[in-house]
Image (tube, rainbow, N blue to C red):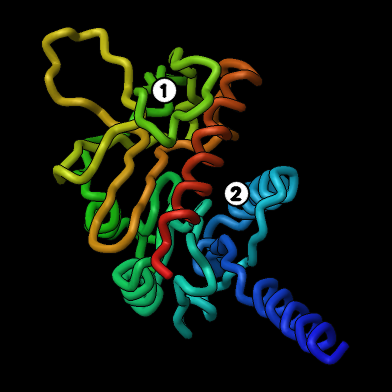
């Protein structure tokens, strides 16, 4: 009888510990970006919260003060940056430390392009985290672009097809060139010029040091071709989150 009670107590304690130590995804709410583009940031955050809830992915919202105080991969296996255009030097340093310790990053769009005043600063931060070089952006007047998908497992696992998707150019999507042997392109701008040897990458996966990082030039809200195409990009994101969670060091 005593052994049974002891076993039950140990089981309960183990279960409680597992629940409270389970790693989560973190979603960054950029207070600095909110000061210059509040409506766009709210649209993005709302979408991502609904997306994560619908896909039963546990997450916390992180604010700038949370980044400044430091984040641990032991608590958050991945930090997702849905619309972090403006960032302070302290926040940037905190993200670097998080990644160097083994944390994973998923970022969208013009990640860390601006200083705290909303001015264009540089593309060095995007290049540092994702092993790329800024190459250019699609002008708004072009209206849209065609994004070709490449079979890059496990990100493209269980996709119904790899047919291209159409993306709005309203936000002037950025494209990049790979600058590291550890960076891989998952999507690129479809080119009509067969002689163009330089790929304009739109989705990049980078494995560096102890962590992984994925950058998306666009998010599912900007896919305009069909609902099926939106689901394809969402599936790539889910695959990315799941793979990153599995790969975090103990």
Displayed quadrant of residue 21: bottom right
Which residue sits at x=45%, y=27%? 169
In the picture, the disc for residue 244 is none
Q: How many marks?
A: 2
Neighbours of disc 2 within 10 Å: few (<14), some (14-19), many (20+): few
Q: Is residue 134 above or below residue 137?
A: below
Residue for badge 1: 141
View extreme (bottom): residue: 2
Looking at the rendered structure, the secondary structure element under dot 2 is helix
User: Where does the image place residue 203, in percent across and percent down from the top left?
Assistant: 37, 36
Which residue sits at x=61%, y=48%? 44
View extreme (right): residue: 1
Q: Name the quarter where the N terminus is drawn.
A: bottom right
Q: Name the quarter where the C terminus is drawn.
A: bottom left
User: Where does the image place residue 193, in percent across and percent down from the top left?
Assistant: 19, 9
Would residue 10 appear left or right of 250 to someone viewing this image?
right
Q: Is residue 199 above or below residue 14?
A: above
Visible residue check, residue 117: no
User: Where does the image place residue 23, in percent across and percent down from the top left?
Assistant: 57, 67
Q: Is residue 126 above or below residue 17?
A: above
Visible residue check, residue 211: yes
Neighbours of disc 1 within 10 Å: few (<14), some (14-19), many (20+): few
Which residue sits at x=78%, y=88%? 6
Q: Nearer the viewer, residue 135 or 162?
A: 162
Would residue 147 appear left or right of 13 to someone viewing this image?
left
Mark 2 and mark 1 lie on one chain; the one further toward the N terminus is 2
Residue for badge 2: 40
Looking at the rendered structure, the secondary structure element under dot 1 is helix
User: Marks 2/1: CA distance?
Assistant: 20 Å
């Amino acid at each position: 009888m005593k052994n049974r009670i002891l076993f039950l107590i140990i089981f309960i304690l183990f279960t409680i510990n597992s629940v409270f130590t389970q790693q989560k995804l973190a979603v960054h709410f950029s207070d600095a970006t909110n000061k210059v583009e509040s409506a766009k940031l709210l649209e993005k955050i709302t979408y991502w919260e609904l997306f994560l809830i619908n896909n039963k992915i546990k997450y916390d919202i992180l604010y700038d003060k949370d980044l400044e105080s430091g984040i641990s991969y032991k608590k958050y296996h991945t930090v997702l940056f849905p619309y972090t255009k403006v960032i302070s030097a302290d926040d940037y340093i905190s993200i670097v430390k998080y990644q160097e310790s083994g944390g994973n990053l998923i970022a969208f769009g013009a990640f860390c392009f601006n200083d705290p005043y909303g001015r264009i600063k540089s593309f060095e931060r995007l290049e540092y985290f994702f092993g790329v070089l800024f190459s250019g952006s699609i002008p708004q007047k072009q209206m849209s672009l065609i994004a070709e998908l490449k079979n890059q497992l496990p990100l493209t696992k269980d996709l119904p097809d790899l047919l291209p998707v159409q993306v709005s150019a309203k936000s002037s999507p950025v494209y990049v060139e790979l600058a590291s042997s550890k960076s891989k392109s998952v999507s690129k701008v479809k080119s009509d010029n067969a002689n163009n040897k330089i790929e304009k990458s739109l989705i990049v996966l980078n494995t560096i040091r102890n962590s992984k990082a994925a950058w998306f030039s666009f998010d599912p809200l900007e896919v305009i071709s069909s609902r099926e195409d939106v689901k394809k990009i969402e599936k790539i994101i889910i695959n990315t989150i799941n793979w990153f969670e599995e790969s975090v060091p103990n």
